[in-house]
Image: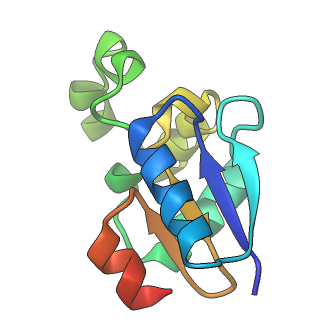
């Protein structure tokens, strides 16, 4: 099975995840999350498949998130509005994201990835 690996090359967590994928011979297609940001339809599907709340898809430690004061603004936005916002800029999206046929992993946690993949 081939996974879709969304990442930002300068992100150290993404680099660790990519190294782990390579070391474990996991077949994946790489996608630069900023150059080809996930669209609203993809995000909606992935959020549903992941079983995670939409907040987990936001890069809460990113500068853009902080500059836009999203911590406060997100509570007043519908899920649809949040998805639309995420689809506007890859720097708002938590990374890396690994998408499989029936699973979506957000962020790199070695134990979780080792168990699920």
Identify which residue, 70 or 31, lies in the foreground.
Answer: 31
Decide if residue 106 is on the left or right side of residue 41.
left
Residue 24's x, y, as percent? 55, 78
State which quarter of the image contains the N terminus.
bottom right
Residue 95 seen in this snapshot: no
Identify which residue, 64 or 98, lies in the foreground.
Answer: 98
Residue 82's x, y, as percent? 47, 41
Q: Residue at x 27, y 31 (%)?
A: 61
User: Where on the picture, by quarter, is residue 23?
Assistant: bottom right
User: Where on the picture, by quarter, is residue 100?
Assistant: bottom right
Position of 36 relative to 65 (above/below)? below
Decide if residue 88 is on the left or right side of residue 41.
left
Residue 4 seen in this snapshot: yes
Q: Residue at x 54, y 49 (%)?
A: 80
Toward the front, the furthest residue is 23
Position of 3 relative to 85 (above/below)? below
Q: Residue at x 38, y 59 (%)?
A: 108
Toward the left, the furthest residue is 72
Q: Residue at x 43, y 61 (%)?
A: 106
Position of 109 relative to 91 (above/below)? below
Decide if residue 88 is on the left or right side of residue 104.
right
Rendered image coloring scheme: rainbow
Identify which residue, 108 or 42, lies in the foreground.
Answer: 108
How many labels were placed on the picture? 0
Identify which residue, 102 or 41, lies in the foreground.
Answer: 102
Position of 29 relative to 57 (above/below)? below
User: Where on the picture, by quarter, is residue 2?
Assistant: bottom right
């Amino acid at each position: 099975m081939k996974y879709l690996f969304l990442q930002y090359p300068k992100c150290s967590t993404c680099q660790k995840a990519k190294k782990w994928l390579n070391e474990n011979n996991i077949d994946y297609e790489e996608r630069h999350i900023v150059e080809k940001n996930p669209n609203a339809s993809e995000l909606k599907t992935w959020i549903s498949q992941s079983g995670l709340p939409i907040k987990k898809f936001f890069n809460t430690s990113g500068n853009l998130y902080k500059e836009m004061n999203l911590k406060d603004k997100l509570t007043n936005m519908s899920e649809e509005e949040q998805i639309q916002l995420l689809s506007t800029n890859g720097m708002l999206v938590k990374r890396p994201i690994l998408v499989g046929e029936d699973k979506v992993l957000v962020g790199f946690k070695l134990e979780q990835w080792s168990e699920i993949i």
